[in-house]
Each structure stands twice: as structure tokens, then as C-alpha cells.
Amino acid sequence: MAVCPITGLKNYDSWIIPFWLILILYLISLVVSLLKFEGNKIVHIALIAEIISAFLIWLVGTMTITHDWM
């Protein structure tokens, strides 16, 4: 939301790429945590919920930065 006043339909490239990279790194860390965690399996439900919420972050964040709302 902080970059929304700065970006527009034609000048969002310098903001969208770091946003996607951070989101990809976050998803990679979630998948690694999901695979490596050996404790209580109930934690996997929380990690799966975080993966689903990452999709929402991607959707709303991308629409906010690009000003291209559905």
C-alpha cells in the first residue's frame, strides 16, 4: 500500500519484481519448512494456511502495485 501512490499502470516494473522475489523466497521457505519439520504434524496445517494466504498476498499486492483491479 505504501508504493500505491508512487506507481501507475506504466511505471510499476521497479516495484513488482522485488515484491515477487520476496514472495517467492517466502514460499520457498514455507515449502522447506513443510518438508523438513519433524515435530507435531498439526503445524503443517498452519503452514498450508500460510501458503493459501500467500496467494491472497500475491493477488492483492500485484493489483495494488499495478493499479489493475479486477
Image (spheres, helix red, strand yellow):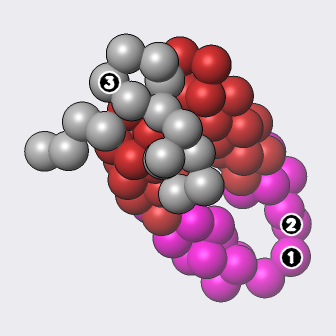
Asked if the residues shown at circle 1 and circle 3 are in contact, with their CB atoms under 8 angstroms apart, the answer is no
Residue at the location (80% across, 55% down)? 33
**Magenta stretch containing residue 36, yes or no?**
yes
Residue segment shown in magenta: 32-52
Determine the secondary structure under disc 1.
loop
Q: Look at 48% across and 47% down and name the residue there.
A: 4
Q: From this viewpoint, is residue 51 visible?
A: no
* In this rendering, position of residue 64 left or right of residue 42: left
- Tag 2's secondary structure? loop
Nearest the eye: 52 or 64: 64
Give the residue type at disc 3: Leu
Q: Amino acid at mark 2?
A: Glu
- Residue 43 horizontal/vertical position (percent): 70, 78
Q: Which residue is mark 1?
A: 39
Q: Secondary structure of the magenta portion, mostly?
A: helix
Q: Is residue 65 magenta?
A: no
Residue 13 appears left or right of 59: right
Q: Amino acid at mark 1?
A: Gly
Which residue is tagged 3?
9
Residue that numbered label 2 is attached to: 38
Label 2 Cα neighbours within 10 Å, binned few <14 / some 14-19 / many ≥20: few
